[in-house]
Structure formats: C-alpha cells, structure tokens
C-alpha cells in the first residue's frame, strides 16, 4: 500500500516500509530501507551511485527493472520471511 516513511513517499508491506522514493536536483533515489537488499544486487549496479540504504539514478539511466524487482523481493523476504 502507499504510505510515508522517514518523510518520503513509500510503499508499505505488512505495516513496514518496503521502498521509498525521493527526487533531488541531479538524481532520483530509491530507498529499500535495508543495506542487505542493496548488497544483494550491488554487483549489478556498478554504474550507479550507492550508499548503505540508497540507490541513486537518473531518468536517462534508470535502475533496470529486473534489478529493482530483486531489491523489492529481498526486502519483502526480510519483512515477512515466511511468505
């Protein structure tokens, strides 16, 4: 469901933040609220700026759909491991 976490728009899953979004002057960011979710795909994001909890990108070079889907799946498993 749609919601807010840490002051930014976010999708909420099982009552916890799943993925947040933010736009800045020179980039866009997604926040999976999990360093482990980013680590799971780090090798596939070599040309992107990463931090512990953020993937930064531009409209000209978006995060590949399959990589973003894997980030979301990793985060969903963290939130609800039995699903």
Image (cartoon, helix red, strand yellow):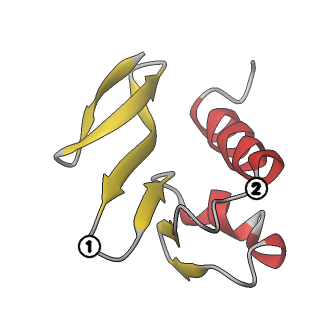
Q: Please, what secondary structure does the residue beneath circle 2 have?
A: loop
Q: Which quarter shows the N terminus?
A: top left
Marks counted in the figure total: 2
Q: Position of residue 68 (x, y in %)?
A: 70, 49
Dot 1 alpha-carbon crowd within 10 angstroms: few under 14, some 14 to 19, many 20 or more? few
Q: Quadrant of residue 47?
A: bottom right
Circle 2/circle 1 CB separation < 8 Å: no
In depth, the one of 77 and 2 nearer the eye is 2
User: Residue 24 vs residue 28: left or right?
Assistant: left
Q: Position of residue 63 (x, y in %)?
A: 67, 59
Residue furthest front in the image: 60
* Residue beneath disc 1: 25
Q: Is residue 4 above or below residue 8?
A: above
Q: Is residue 59 above or below residue 26?
A: above
In depth, the one of 55 and 76 nearer the eye is 55
* Residue beneath disc 2: 64
User: Residue 51 vs residue 75: left or right?
Assistant: left
Q: Which quarter shows the C terminus?
A: top right
Q: Which residue appears at 70% of the width and 70% of the height? A: 39
Q: Position of residue 58 (x, y in %)?
A: 51, 68
Marks 2 and 1, how far apart in space? 21 Å
Q: Is residue 66 above or below residue 61?
A: above
Q: Which residue appears at 71% of the width and 30% of the height? A: 81
Q: Which residue appears at 25% of the width and 33% of the height? A: 4
Q: Which residue appears at 51% of the width and 51% of the height? A: 32
Q: Name the disc covering residue 49, or none.
A: none
Q: In this rendering, which labeled residue sits more in front, label 2 or label 1?
A: 1
Q: Is residue 17 above or below residue 70?
A: above
């Amino acid at each position: 469901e749609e919601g807010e976490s840490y002051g930014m728009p976010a999708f909420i899953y099982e009552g916890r933040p799943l993925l947040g979004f933010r736009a800045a002057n020179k980039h866009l960011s997604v926040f999976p609220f999990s360093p482990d979710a980013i680590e799971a795909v780090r090798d596939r994001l070599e040309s992107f700026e990463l931090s512990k909890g953020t993937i930064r990108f531009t409209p000209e070079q978006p995060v590949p759909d399959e990589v973003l889907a894997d980030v979301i799946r990793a985060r969903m498993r963290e939130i609800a491991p039995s699903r």
